[in-house]
Amino acid sequence: MTTDFAATKRQFLLPEGVIYLDGNSLGPLPRGVAERLQTTVADEWGQMLIRGWNTAGWMDMPARVGNRIARLVGAEPGSVVMGDTLSIKVYQALASALELVPGRRVILSDTGNFPSDLYIADGLVRTLGDGHALKTVAPEAVEDAIDGSVGVVMVTEVDYRTGRRHDMARLAAKAHAHGALLVWDLAHSAGAFPVHLARDGADFAVGCTYKYLNSGPGGPAFIYVAPRHQDAARPALSGWLGHEVPFAFDLDYRPGAGIERMRVGTPPILQLAALDAALDVWAGVDLDDLRARALALQDRFIAAVEAACPMLTLATPRDHGQRGSQVSFRHAEGYAIMQALIAEGVIGDFRAPDILRFGITPLYIDEGDIDRAAAILARIMTTGSWDQPQFKARARVT
Ligand SMILES: Cc1ncc(COP(=O)(O)O)c(C=O)c1O
């Protein structure tokens, strides 16, 4: 292992006394971000004003930062661009992909997909009004459900509740053999483990940056289009910054070259600057090291919790090949248990109906954190201290 994980941990500002096991939902603050934001705000926005679009390179940021993400997800240079939120990029990728398979009207997804992806697909089907249908099957049944009627397979690689992971190369082979395209949601993959979009035959992919890439709340999403599709893909959301020459202000839309056409409107420069600084953390990180360490820490957590808390049921697959970078347990009172844990400084989150989620992120979580978190959870479960009214009142965000 060449990665120095003690050094990466020092690059994060974590509150004293907190063990942060929720980087799968919102990554913590890397030290370099506040300084970078200060520079962008004071020196660039403050002093350059509108000149910043050229002078500070703001207009090039979506593609420049996209290339930094491309390296983390195994994508070809020039195939990733930043912008908008993930839900919007799901729409754009799905609509673009569907157009590339004329005559095919089925979008295949799974019941473990994130609701926003399914809602977006359902909304698109209604907008198209052309006999399209969204078909959802159990995550384990996706491969067998791919047949000649399917136009696009749209799946999130790692299930946000259980942490179960699809086999990207396998699904791509099956989909392509049947003439279908694949849209991957990498929300729980990018920065979580090595992803090989190009090697594993992805057609389109989208992802957010506020989870394992630590860009901060509301950080911009990314979209990947395989080079073989870029010139044929109509961006579906044809905004002016995806135009071939935005500042010609033509009345007719002509898509820009390559991945640039997937841009829509004005990019969020402050959030892109935060992301750009957050990506510096990855400089000395080998993603295979990250994966090996994440699995070891997950196994350590699972073993400790299962030994002390028989009332919790593991929801995450035991098979390493089928795991993302989170560990989930089920319990009917999962919400209250998680609130009791958070009150003791161990921050994870809860997903209805009964899932306690723990993000295992080696950039800033080590063995000591895992052992302390498991011990606190064991104490809460054996004493029943979670069973108090203040832990049962549901907040807006769980
Ligand atoms: C897998 C997945 N897809 C889509 C979304 C929605 O992302 P956004 O709220 O940024 O549009 C999320 C949010 O957590 C997610 O986990």
Image: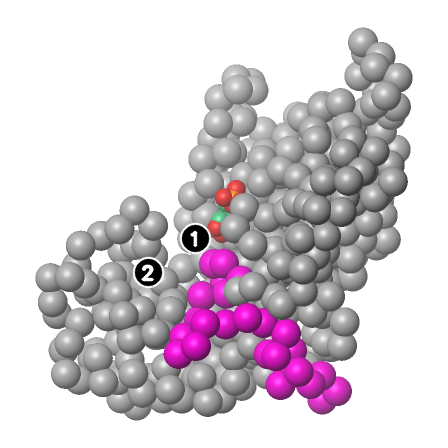
What's the residue type where badge 2 is placed? Phe
In front of the other: 263 or 275? 275
Q: Which residues are magenta?
A: 1-27
Q: Secondary structure at mark 2?
A: strand
In front of the other: 182 or 216? 216
Q: Quadrant of residue 130?
A: top right
What's the residue type where badge 1 is placed? Gly
In front of the other: 48 or 330? 48
Instruction: Report whether residue 179 is seen.
Output: no
How many numbered discs sit on the rendered protein? 2
- Is ligand 1 within 8 Å of the beta carbon of the residue shown at mark 2? no
Q: Closer to the N terminus: mark 2 or mark 1? A: 1
Left or right of 360 in this view: 225: right
Q: Which residue is drawn at the image coordinates 29% and 75% (left, top)?
A: 344
Tag 2 residue: 350
Q: Quadrant of residue 193?
A: bottom right
The mark lying in front, picked from 2 and 1, is: 2
Tell me where residue 86 appears, x and y as whole percent: 57, 43
Q: Which residue is drawn at the image coordinates 24% and 61% (left, top)?
A: 335
Left or right of 196 in this view: 394: left
The circle drawn on residue 112 is 1
In front of the other: 89 or 154? 89
How far apart in space, not on screen, are marks 2 and 1 (Cα)? 15 Å
Does 16 lie within the magenta span? yes
Q: Secondary structure at mark 1?
A: loop
